[in-house]
Amino acid sequence: MAKWMELLGVEQTTGYKCEECGEVSNDMQIEPLYECSSCGQKYTRSNSSTGAGSGCPNCSRFGKLISNFSCPECQEGPLEEVVAFRCPSGDLYEDEGDLENHLVEEHGWEVLNTLKEAAPE
Ligand SMILES: [Zn+2]
Ligand SMILES: [Zn+2]
Ligand SMILES: [Zn+2]
């Protein structure tokens, strides 16, 4: 992790990235994710037609379990574990560039450019 991140209070942590929408978060839903073997619809257990996971909400056909966790954002993607950076306000970013944009645009921390030059690593 770069020195300037430490100086700004950024932490490195484990995040979960949705393969569908790209959302990176720490609070994944502990809800299994299923995929319909007939129409391809992805759905969580509580969205299934039976409420127990086996029925597709679209066509009621059988679906197979594809992940034990589902994305809190779109509820469609399986999640993969990634190394993420947490800004002091709690937002998670996997990409350093996205984090930088966030810090400058949301927090107004243009100072990070100065820090980067002063303490590159
Ligand atoms: Zn279906
Ligand atoms: Zn998602
Ligand atoms: Zn933030």
Image: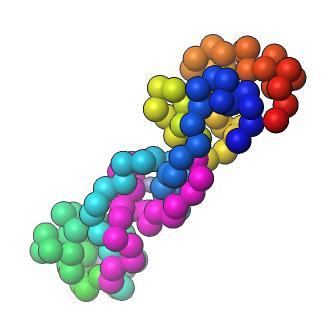
Answer whether residue 121 is visible to the viewer in this image.
yes
Which segment is the magenta one? 64-84
119 or 23: nearer the viewer: 119
The image shows residue 47 at horizontal and vertical percentages of 21, 63
Q: Is residue 9 magenta?
A: no
Q: Is residue 79 magenta?
A: yes
Dividing the picture into quadrants, the one containing residue 48 is bottom left
Examine the rendered structure and indicate whether residue 34 appears above or below residue 91.
Answer: below
**Is 76 positioned to the left or the right of 84 in the image?**
left
Say which residue appears at 66% left-offset and 16% top-offset: 109
The image shows residue 101 at horizontal and vertical percentages of 67, 29
Q: Quadrant of ligand 2?
A: bottom left
Examine the rendered structure and indicate whether residue 111 appears above or below residue 90.
Answer: above
Dividing the picture into quadrants, the one containing residue 39 is bottom left
Say which residue appears at 36% left-offset and 48% top-offset: 27
Dividing the picture into quadrants, the one containing residue 33 is bottom left
Looking at the image, what colour scheme do you see? rainbow
Examine the rendered structure and indicate whether residue 102 appears above or below residue 33.
Answer: above
Answer whether residue 23 is visible to the viewer in this image.
no
The image shows residue 10 at horizontal and vertical percentages of 59, 31
The image shows residue 44 at horizontal and vertical percentages of 28, 65
**Is 120 positioned to the left or the right of 93 in the image?**
right
Q: Quadrant of the N terminus?
A: top right
**Is 72 positioned to the left or the right of 47 in the image?**
right
Say which residue appears at 46% left-offset and 63% top-offset: 79
